[in-house]
Structure formats: C-alpha cells, structure tokens
Amino acid sequence: MNRTIMRKARGMKTSDGAGVALTRIIGQPGLTRLDPFLLLDEFGSDVPGDYLAGFPPHPHRGFQTVTYMLKGKMGHKDSVGNEGLIEDGGLQWMNAGSGIIHEEMPKQTEGEMRGFQLWVNLPASEKMSAPGYQDIPSAQVPELSKGDGIRIRVLAGELDGVSGAVTTQAVKPLFLDVHSADCEPITLPTDSGHSAFVYCYEGQVSIGATTLKRGEIGVLGEGNQVEILLQEHARLILVAGEPINEPVEQYGPFVMNTRAEIEQALKDYQQGKLVQRQ
C-alpha cells in the first residue's frame, strides 16, 4: 500500500542556542510533533554570524538527538567525558537518557555550515537509561545506488538488506538521505504502522498528486512504501519510526511523561544531580 501525503507544512525561521539561525520544521505551530519525533531543525548559512555562537552547554533528559552534517564542522563535548567532531556527511546519535549536559560549537569561522538536528522521543521504560553517543564519520555511512541517477545514504534502519550506521532500537528508526542526479521515480519501503515524513531540502519531489518544494515537509499517511518522483538534482530525507503512544510532558530540553517527572528533572539540574557518571 502506497503512502500519500496527508499534511504539508513549511518550516519557520527562528534561532536557538546562542543565536544560531535555523528553520524549525517539526516543533513549530504548523507541525508541533509527529510521534515519536519531537523536533526537526535545518540549519544552513555561509554567513558566519548566523552560526558561530553555536550551542553552549545545555542539559537534556528523556529523549535522543540526531545531528547530521551535510557540510561544515561541528565540535561537541559533554558532561560524561565524550568529545568529538562531526564533519561533512557525518552524524551523531546521542541518547540523553537520564541526563546529560552537552555543547555543540562550530569548528570553522567561514564557509557554509549546513545540516539537521532531529529530536526523537524515548518510551518511559528508557527515559532514565544511561546516556551515550554514536559518532559516525561519513565514510561509515553506507550508500546505495538506484539506477544511474539516485544515490541513497542509509543513516539508520535498513534498505535492500543494507543496515544503516546507527544501531539504536528505541523506536526502530529509518533515516535515509536521497540524492537525485536526474528526474527519476523511486519506491522506498517503510514499516507499516510507523510514523513517516519526507522533507525536501533541494529542488522538488512529487508523491502522488502532491509536490514538495525546497523547505517543505510532507507527513505521510499509512502504508508500507512510498513512491517518489524526484526532479533533477532533488534531495530529501525520509524518516520513519515506531510511535510510542505515551503522554508527552515537555519543558524545554526535558521530555518526560508527567509534570512531576519534569519538576524532578529541573530539581536534579539545579542541584547538580542531572548527570550521573556511568
């Protein structure tokens, strides 16, 4: 059964961190959440003032973050001793779990900085799990070719028997980055029952009777595959995950199930107890 676009939205320009200019795609009034996805930001600029301030130390609890760099260099370090660098085509999948304080700071003073950050919720049973990282350089991201004109990077999940670089199983995520050199159709499988969306970040693509232009997200309806007509030089991400179907209580960087758990997270942070070294 083919999925179709049930809802279309355009991202909202905003800023976050210490003043990083970005576009908020999920987590804005036009699309608040898509269980299990809490937030999707696209950042992209060749103006250093738009990104140099970065994201100084800040706390998280109760969910995972994915930072995928299309271009540029982003350094990171955290309160449990991890430190690294995400470069062109690389990604980091972070489990905030029970609590972590981390920072993400550009390691360049000129040139284009472009990429995505996705927030993925955790079920109640894993919200207090041990924090951790997967840092994955571009060379470790599997790539597939479809015909002569389509290239697919498998960041998470599985496609045609090829497993993505990310091993998290909390919501059984699928994360594909699809590039087209020509105008071609492609059919991509998705697990039935999983929430899914397509975000077009270059050119335009069509799914059924609906066209997505650059900067537009299409929330997909039910089905086990999606047929996409990619225009020449189009690029998109396809993301899917198993819905958690639990209450969501969010206060900034804390995402729990109840207000009491949010208040405990705030108390732990204020008392320096948010992070317990493993």
Image (spheres, rainbow, N blue to C red):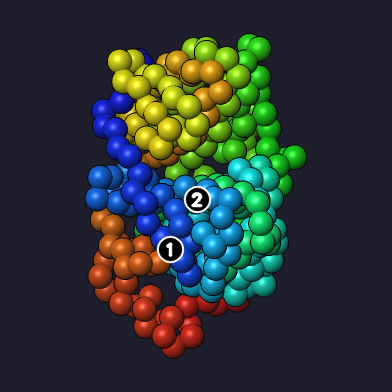
Q: Is residue 223 above or below residue 127?
A: above
Location of the C terminus (image quadrant): bottom right
Q: Is residue 248 visible?
A: yes
Q: Residue at x 44, y 24 (%)?
A: 204
> Label 1, label 2: how many angstroms apart (C-alpha)?
10 Å
Q: Is residue 98 visible?
A: no
Quadrant hosting residue 103: bottom right
Q: Residue furthest right?
A: 139
Disc 1 residue type? Asp
Location of the N terminus (image quadrant): top left
- Label 2 SS: strand
Quadrant hosting residue 131: bottom right
User: Which residue is nearer to you in this view: 111 or 122?
Assistant: 111
Disc 2 residue type? Phe
What residue is pinned by disc 2? 43
What residue is pinned by disc 1? 16
